[in-house]
Amino acid sequence: MTYELTNHYDSPNFIVSIKCTDSDGNIKIIPLDDANRDYQEYLEYIKIHGMSIVSCTDCGDGIPNDSMWQYLDNAEQLLIDKYGSDQNKLTALREDRYVRAMEAKTPYESMTVAGSVIDNTPQIIKDKYRHLPMRR
């Protein structure tokens, strides 16, 4: 399975669905809805396979959301390409990633994945969230 995050045709600043392609080339569109069975499967596949099964070429409005675009390796580059060096958006992205990594939430349940996020987070963000318990 591969997943591609897709924007709304009328409003390209909003990621609204996930295009899922199976090994036979069958495609289905999955809404970003916690109650949707296919969306829950998407989250489970991320837990098993990591973010390598997800692709995205546009970060939408640049705000972290349920599509999980913000956890892709190229997330910061997507933001920079679309919004330049908007420090507010970059800081929000880094904070979101850091908090999820510290709380061991998808896709950072494994410390091997979360470790680099935690280590590479700017100290000012670490200080802001120093109330979070340390991960081991």
Image (spheres, rainbow, N blue to C red):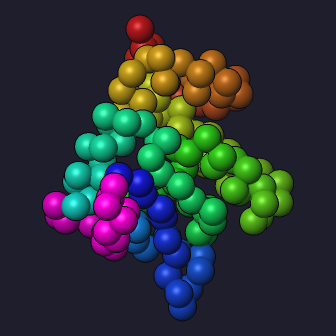
Residue at position x 30%, y 52% from top?
A: 42
Instruction: Give the side of residue 33 with respect to residue 132, left or right.
Output: left
Residue at position x 31%, y 34% from top?
A: 48
Residue at far right of view: 85
Instruction: Give the side of residue 81 with respect to residue 101, left or right.
Output: right
Magenta span contains residue 39? no
Residue at far front of view: 24
Against 22, is 27 above or below?
below
Q: How many marks?
A: 0
Against 121, is 107 above or below?
below
Quarter of the image with the C terminus in it: top left
Residue 87 vs residue 31, the one in the foreground:
31
| Location of residue 34 in the rendering, given as x and y in whole percent from the top left corner | 23, 60
| Location of residue 110 in the rendering, given as x and y in whole percent from the top left corner | 39, 21
Residue at position x 49%, y 24% from top?
A: 114
Instruction: Give the side of residue 96 with respect to residue 23, left or right.
Output: right
Magenta span contains residue 27? yes
Q: Can residue 32 be seen by looking at this rendering?
A: no
For the record, the magenta segment spans 21-37
Residue at position x 41%, y 54% from top?
A: 2
